[in-house]
Image (cartoon, rainbow, N blue to C red):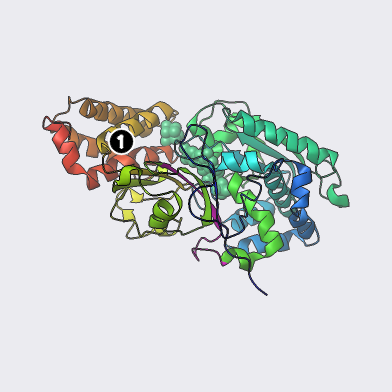
Amino acid sequence: MTQAPPPQTQVPPPQEAPIQHGAGQPLPWEPVLMAAVGRPGGHLLADYLSRGGYDGLRRAVAMTPEDVIKVVGDSKLLGRGGAGFPTGVKWGGTRRNPGPRHLVVNADESEPGTFGNRYAIEADPHGLIEGMLICCYAVGIRHAYIYIRGENLAGAEKLELAIQEAYGAGLLGTRILGTDGLDVDISVTRGAGAYVCGEETALMESLEGRRAQPRIRPPFPIEVGGGLFGRPTVVNNVETLMCVPHIMIRGAAWFSSIGAPACPGPKLYTISGHVNRPGVYELPMGTTLFDLIYKYAGGMQRNQKVKAVSPGALACQLLPGTDLNVQMDTATLTRPPHWHPPFGPVGFGAGGIIVYGEETDIVQVVARASGFFARESCGKCVPCREGTHWMGDVLGRIAHGHGRPRDLPLLEDVTRNIGGRKTLCALGDFSVNAVASALRLFRPEFEAYVNGGSR
Ligand SMILES: Cc1cc2nc3c(=O)[nH]c(=O)nc-3n(C[C@H](O)[C@H](O)[C@H](O)COP(=O)(O)O)c2cc1C
Ligand code: SF4
């Protein structure tokens, strides 16, 4: 049997970003996650059904729940939200714990440089609903919740409309597709406007009506006492769940043959910064940074060289512009040589790539990034609450030309006291990644600032 080629497509970036829609590299392959982009009414149920929509669910309910989980496990789908946890393992672990169980969709996506979920939801909300229903069938879940970033009003409206359509067509509610045992209700909650709301336990606190602060683990969300309302809970990213219907239709072998063998499948890369065509690109996981920048995102503005890249938005360590042959995927960027003690992996996060041209002032970049994390720290644990502000203050001083030579070892000391898994959630580690890697890669620029010049 001929295998479907890997997916590849380009969609326009957020309205504010300059782009010529549809320009650039020809799109020889059929898109999968972005199939609805550019189709008038592509977000509506009628269009989704005309594209074979809900056939993945039909296939799933013809199997046992255990077999569905096995197919998802065999596909080697890793969560797309940042931690890269195997989805089949998460589903299987939750199912083994007693019900009632819940599904929470993480559509918070609040980090600068990430916007793939936003496009996926607005383009194809039924793709997400179908992925959720397959998860609910496999894990034995009655109630599912979508937690969407509060500012993404268009996405929330598209989801509400799609949910109404699904109820009307018997795809939500009781006896879905005429089956005994698949009863699912979905509700949408708009987020409370903080980056930490995307951390899965803070998200559940917020859903339960409390201030979004991460919980102490264990118990983990899949366990009794650790999930939503104390029940075993699957928390999955939007993109993760949108892969699932395609796995059910085309098979685990198809999915695991796409891109990087250790973390395969289609990936929504979001590219911003000094490239000519920023946007969302659906490509095989493991596409090289060089191809992403020069083949798809139109190369660099004014033909400048790449100075550095944030591979997973602000939360990850910087890659130097000399490292363009690196494969952009979870596995590659979390193992040597992309591992820098004591801070750990460079990281891939959710694949939000920010490209900095050679004219970029890296000191200014990390000073701003640091300010972001200081503002977003929830304050629950000391190293992050205190350290992010110290870091922000020292970097702000340096960036404004008032730094002193002793600020650099001080900065390093602060990063070491926050980073390396010393905090309750990963925001602490995220906050030091850009700073520590910039000090490692671009130290002379910091020295120029503290010795009296701006660079
Ligand atoms: C500060 C912080 C913010 C996060 N924001 C998001 C987010 O916006 N979306 C997301 O899916 N995961 C986010 N995560 C990761 C989630 O905690 C969790 O790992 C993920 O939702 C699990 O889904 P997955 O297995 O499908 O990747 C964040 C983590 C941290 C520490
Ligand atoms: S690391 Fe920061 S954001 Fe996370 S719990 Fe601690 S203070 Fe809150």
**Left of 386 or right of it: where is 1?**
right
Q: Residue at x 63, y 45 (%)?
A: 37
Q: Quadrant of residue 228?
A: top right
Magenta region: 257-272
**Left of 368 or right of it: where is 255?**
right
* Residue 408 location (% of width, % of height): 18, 36
Q: Quadrant of residue 120?
A: top right
Front residue of 405 and 413: 405
Determine whether the residue tagged by mark 1 lies in a helix, strand or loop: helix
Instruction: Work out whether residue 219 can be spotted.
Output: no
Front residue of 389 and 366: 366
* Residue 315 location (% of width, % of height): 40, 41
**Left of 130 or right of it: where is 331?**
left
Front residue of 403 and 266: 266
Position of residue 300 relative to residue 164, above or below, is below
Crowding near pointer 1: few (<14 within 10 Å), some, many (20+)? Answer: many
Tell me the quadrant of the picture where the N terminus can be found. Answer: bottom right
- Give the amino acid type for the residue marked by disc 1 in the picture: Val
Q: What is the total number of numbered labels drawn onto the structure image? A: 1
Q: Residue at x 44, y 49 (%)?
A: 297
Taking the magenta stretch, the answer to whether it contains residue 267 is yes
Tell me the quadrant of the picture where the C terminus can be found. Answer: top left
* Residue 63 location (% of width, % of height): 78, 62
* Residue 62 location (% of width, % of height): 81, 61
The residue that mark 1 highlights is 366
Position of residue 227 relative to residue 54, above or below, is above
Q: Residue at x 30, y 36 (%)?
A: 366
Instruction: Work out whether residue 73 can be spotted.
Output: yes
Q: Quadrant of residue 96?
A: bottom right
